[in-house]
Image (cartoon, helix red, strand yellow):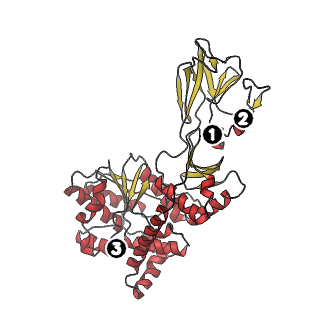
Amino acid sequence: MGPADLDYTALIPLLAPHEGAPRWRVAWSGGLDSTVLLHLLTVYRQQRPLAPPLLAIHVNHQLQADAADWAEHCGELARSLGVPLRQPTVSVSSSGAGLEADARHARYAALEAGMAPGEIVLFAHHRDDQAETVLLRLLRGSGLAGLQGMPRQRAMGRGTLLRPLLPWGRTALEAYARRHRLTWVEDPSNSDQRQDRNFIRQQVMPLLASRWPDSVASLVRAAGHLEDADRALESLLPPLPLRINRFGDVGLSLDALLAAEDAVASLQLRRWLRDRGLLVPETRPLKEFLRQLRGDGNRVRLSGGDWVLERFAGAVFLLSATLPECGPPATLMPGARVALPAGSLALEPAAEGPALRLEAGEVLRLQWRRGGERLLLPGRAGHRRLKTLLQEAGVPPWWRQRLPLLYLGDELLAVGDLWLSQSSRYCARGGEGCWRPRWKPALATPKRPLSPHAD
């Protein structure tokens, strides 16, 4: 597409399907690309009043001496455009992945903060950015998924990330900025060729273009071919059987996953993650995960940022990287329910079957495992260690500390709704004055797509 092709009407086919969103958030650095995007969206909304309201977000990473001046510039331009502006300040902590990756992680977290379900976050990445990404990943040895470049659309936080400018090159954005007399800030770090992307942009891409003038278009086209091939391969594979444990955690059958060779298993696993709105990990960690699954280790894990795949009991379960906290100790009366971060527990009437017989006004104490608890199971001889019971019952390790324990005084009466102890309040047949615990755990599996802040 040429420079004259870029105006608000060209974005209608890309943005119209998202006009029902509650809000469009614009990732705005103050630079050329994102300033063009913000201006385009402002004109778009003027011409299409039913489009969602805009919110520009300029993140201060505290990495540049001119950051305050950039924030002032963005404030003035946002006011002139009539666009609300949010300017969060973040601290970039080192994770060992490099400054660029760490800054991106902090920036994405700030962009997601306070996001309502269904909101759209728009980024200004364009065709030249895509070509650089594909070449950079090729040089890093990325697999089929990585060589597809940045997706035009994917899940992000509670909403969706969208890149509407990917069809246009840098020259089209520059022409638009000149035509509308836009002003923007220049980030001096963009000239630092110690950063791989800057070196590719300033040294490699011009050299390629001098020999192959259509090199940018060719790289982007090749990425599209790889995406088509990837989807075609995945469509030929049967879906893997699901496994859902008693706590509602969702996983895949380990035997079915490992029945195929690694190349096929990798495709199946990637498709399952993608169908759940998760960003697929790179080929190397995925292959290493499969290699470990074929070994004898029990605690095999693959981290995807905000989510984790973990092997347990013949399945691979998908979990949130940060599981709900247990919550503070609480009290529970017959007929009541207590809600805690790890789930909710109620005492329900039990007309028949094993239960707890409680006197009027008695209050049970709810607390969590501390270690050393022992339980006398009905019909069994001798007390058993709770740790052993949990292991024998196949309770996943991530739930063993999150099961509520019910006490009357110092006497342990129940472990969630898994076991009742042969206590002074145990009632084998239920009846009047008898109550049974009912535990509803909070989901450990991600409720909706999560984003690991990488593309």
Residue name at image x 34 percent, y 73 percent: 169
Q: Is residue 169 above or below residue 58?
A: below
Q: 368 or 104, which lies in front?
A: 368
Disc 1 + disc 2, Cβ < 8 Å: no
Give the residue type at disc 1.
Trp
Q: Which mark is residue 169?
A: 3
Quadrant in the rendering for residue 323: top right
- Which residue is the site of mark 1? 399
Label 3, label 1: how many angstroms apart (C-alpha)? 50 Å
Q: Position of residue 145 (x, y in %)?
A: 50, 66
Q: Disc 3, disc 1: CB below 8 Å?
A: no
Q: Secondary structure at mark 2?
A: helix
Local secondary structure at mark 1: helix
Three-letter code, disc 2: Leu
- Residue 115 drawn at (x, y percent): 40, 47
Q: CA distance from mark 1 to mark 2?
A: 13 Å
Please state which of residues 281 and 351 is positioned toward the viewer in this rendering: 351
Taking the view exactly as shown, the residue that stands out farthest to the right is: 382
**Residue 211 at x, y = what percent?**
42, 88
Amino acid carrying mark 3 in the image: Gly
Circle 2 is placed at which residue position? 389
Label 3 or label 2, whichever lies nearer to me, is: 2
Q: Residues within 10 Å of mark 2 (few under 14, many from 20)?
A: some
Q: Are marks 3 and 2 in contact (CB under 8 Å)?
A: no
Residue 221's tag is: none
Q: Left or right: where does residue 242 sit relative to residue 372?
A: left
Which of the two discs, 1 and 2, sits closer to the camera?
Answer: 2
Q: Residue furthest bottom?
A: 211
Q: Is residue 334 left or right of residue 190?
A: right
Report crowding for label 3: few under 14, some 14 to 19, many 20 or more residues within 10 A (C-alpha). Answer: many
Point out the tag, 3 or 1, that comes first from the N-terminus.
Answer: 3
